[in-house]
Image (cartoon, rainbow, N blue to C red):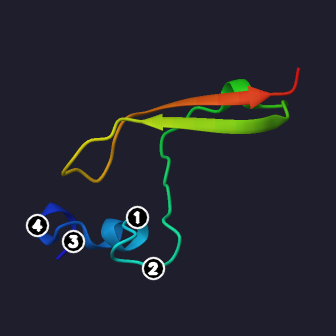
């Protein structure tokens, strides 16, 4: 059973370090990167809200680019 009824088994396998002993995976969806086209990105910082009992969170992202 997938989704909420099954306690998000795919999300837990990919994202939960207690379930998977591999390095956890972060998935970012629906990101508008139009402002970064043609620029060299040096670093990207992600600041998620730490919410308990959910499988996702809003994230503020900041990209550091070369001048």
Q: Determine the residue located farthest toward the right in the rendered image.
A: 67
Image quarter hosting the N terminus: bottom left
Q: Is residue 57 above or below residue 39?
A: below
Eye-nearest disc, 3 or 2: 2
Disc number placed over residue 5 in the picture, else none: 4
Q: Which residue is mark 2?
A: 21
Q: Which comes before the other along the chain, label 1 or label 4? A: 4
**At x 51% / y 77%, what residue is drawn?**
22
User: How far, Cα to Cα, is label 1 from label 4?
Assistant: 18 Å
The percent position of residue 37, horizontal first and vertical second, equals 77, 31
The secondary element bearing badge 2 is classed as loop
Q: Which comes before the other along the chain, label 2 or label 4? A: 4
The percent position of residue 6, horizontal first and vertical second, equals 15, 71
Disc number placed over residue 2 in the picture, else none: 3
Image quarter hosting the C terminus: top right
User: How far, Cα to Cα, is label 1 from label 2?
Assistant: 10 Å
Position of 39 with respect to 29 (left or right) is right
**At x 21% / y 47%, what residue is drawn?**
52
Q: Residues within 10 Å of mark 3 (few under 14, many from 20)?
A: few
């Amino acid at each position: 059973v997938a989704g909420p009824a099954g306690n998000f088994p795919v999300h837990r396998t990919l994202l939960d370090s207690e379930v998977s002993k591999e390095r956890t995976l972060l998935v970012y969806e629906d990101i508008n990167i139009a402002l970064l086209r043609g620029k060299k990105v040096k670093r990207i910082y992600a600041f998620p809200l730490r919410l308990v009992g959910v499988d996702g969170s809003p994230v503020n992202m900041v990209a550091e680019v070369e001048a």
